[in-house]
């Protein structure tokens, strides 16, 4: 039977919906989105006969996709709890999603010989690996990488890992507890409100446009080398520097637990070298366009 189906967990979210849009244009695969809509939204649904949207939790992936498993070519696992500070407030939700749910996804792919592309985070391996203990989020993501390494060692399980660096762009979350930094700033700027900078403001980040991120995911999927890839910008900015790009007022918010103070490029992950990719879209150009077209 021809395997012509791609699964995207978190397909109604920011990154997942952009990935689906990209694969509809660049491939002939059919796509199923699996999302529990904790942060995803139906507004991100794409009207196309090749896409089906299923509301379900990754903990139930084997049951939800039992009638499709023989047709599945690959699975992009983006449907995890994905915020540092919020993982302190919602630790149970973080663990249920990133530990229990993700292990079900890994097992589903392993048991059915499905190619896995996993979205990792720079937050789990920064500061020479010490940042993995900064938050429940970073801890769970780091443990998932260890699990994948062991599955490869024990069973020769093949997968691709892509590290995300502060992704921004169309469909990013702009309000609420799961909003991104650039999304928050953009929303506040358009509403003529002071930008909210978490103290000290000197913490640095590498920001990557969603198009560059999706292109890297496609490259990893196509390359099929069982490797780790990072997609980031070459230049890092402090949060204050980013706020100043908007040329407007900003205010400070209290420091938060789990905050990282430096952004470092991923050099090594466990036994794998990381294949470094750099985005072509510059943050300053993106913000300049927002300011000009306010």
Image (cartoon, rainbow, N blue to C red):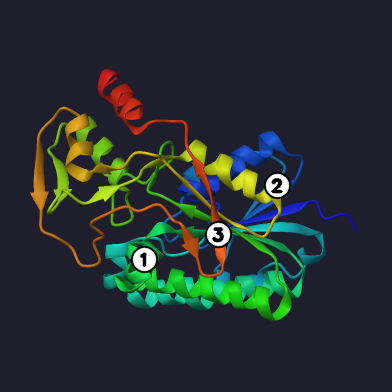
**Residue appearing at x 72%, y 43% in the figure:** 50
For label 3, the SS is strand
Residue density around tag 1, few if under 14, some if 14–19, many if 20 or more, within 10 Å: few
Check the image and name the residue furthest to the bottom.
154
Query: How far apart are the two marked residues, 2 and 1, measured between alpha carbons?
Result: 29 Å
Please tell me whether residue 269 is drawn above or below residue 111 in the rendered image.
above
Residue 222 has which mark?
A: 2
Query: How far apart are the two marked residues, 1 and 3, measured between alpha carbons?
Result: 14 Å
Give the quarter of the image for residue 226. bottom right
Quarter holding the N terminus?
bottom right
Query: How far apart are the two marked residues, 2 and 3, measured between alpha carbons?
Result: 18 Å
Quarter holding the C terminus?
top left
**Residue appearing at x 40%, y 65% in the figure:** 124
Determine which residue is flagged by label 1.
Answer: 128
Query: Label 1 near label 2: C-beta < 8 Å?
Result: no
For label 1, the SS is helix
- Of residues 91 and 151, which is closer to you in this image? 151
Frontmost of labels 2 and 3 is: 3
**Residue appearing at x 17%, y 33% in the figure:** 244
Q: Earlier in the sequence, mark 2 or mark 3?
A: 2
Residue 273 has which mark?
A: 3
Check the image and name the residue furthest to the right.
1
Q: Earlier in the sequence, mark 1 or mark 3?
A: 1
Q: Earlier in the sequence, mark 2 or mark 1?
A: 1
**Residue appearing at x 32%, y 44% in the figure:** 174
Frontmost of labels 2 and 1 is: 1
């Amino acid at each position: 039977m021809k395997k012509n189906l791609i699964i995207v967990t978190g397909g109604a979210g920011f990154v997942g919906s952009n990935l689906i849009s990209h694969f509809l244009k660049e491939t002939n695969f059919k796509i199923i989105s699996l999302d529990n809509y904790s942060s995803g939204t139906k507004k991100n649904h794409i009207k196309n006969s090749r896409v089906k949207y299923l509301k379900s939790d990754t903990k139930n992936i084997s049951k939800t996709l039992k009638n499709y498993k023989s047709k599945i070519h690959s699975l992009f696992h983006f449907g995890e709890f994905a915020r540092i500070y919020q993982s302190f407030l919602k630790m149970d939700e973080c663990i249920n999603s990133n530990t229990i749910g993700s292990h079900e996804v890994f097992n589903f792919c392993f048991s059915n010989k499905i190619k896995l592309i996993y979205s990792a985070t720079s937050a789990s391996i920064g500061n020479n690996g010490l940042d993995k203990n900064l938050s429940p989020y970073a801890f769970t993501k780091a443990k998932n990488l260890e699990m994948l390494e062991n599955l490869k060692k024990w069973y020769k399980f093949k997968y691709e890992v892509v590290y995300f660096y502060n992704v921004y762009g169309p469909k990013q979350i702009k309000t609420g507890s799961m909003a991104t930094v650039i999304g928050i700033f953009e929303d506040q700027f358009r509403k003529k409100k002071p930008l909210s900078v978490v103290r000290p403001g000197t913490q640095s980040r590498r920001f990557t446009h969603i198009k560059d991120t999706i292109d890297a995911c496609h490259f990893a999927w196509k390359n099929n080398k069982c490797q780790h890839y990072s997609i980031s910008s070459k230049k890092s900015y402090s949060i204050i520097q980013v706020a100043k790009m908007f040329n407007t007022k900003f205010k400070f918010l209290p420091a938060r637990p789990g905050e990282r103070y430096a952004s470092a490029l991923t050099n090594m992950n466990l036994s794998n070298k990381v294949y470094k990719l750099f985005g072509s879209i510059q943050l300053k150009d993106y913000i300049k366009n927002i300011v000009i077209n306010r």
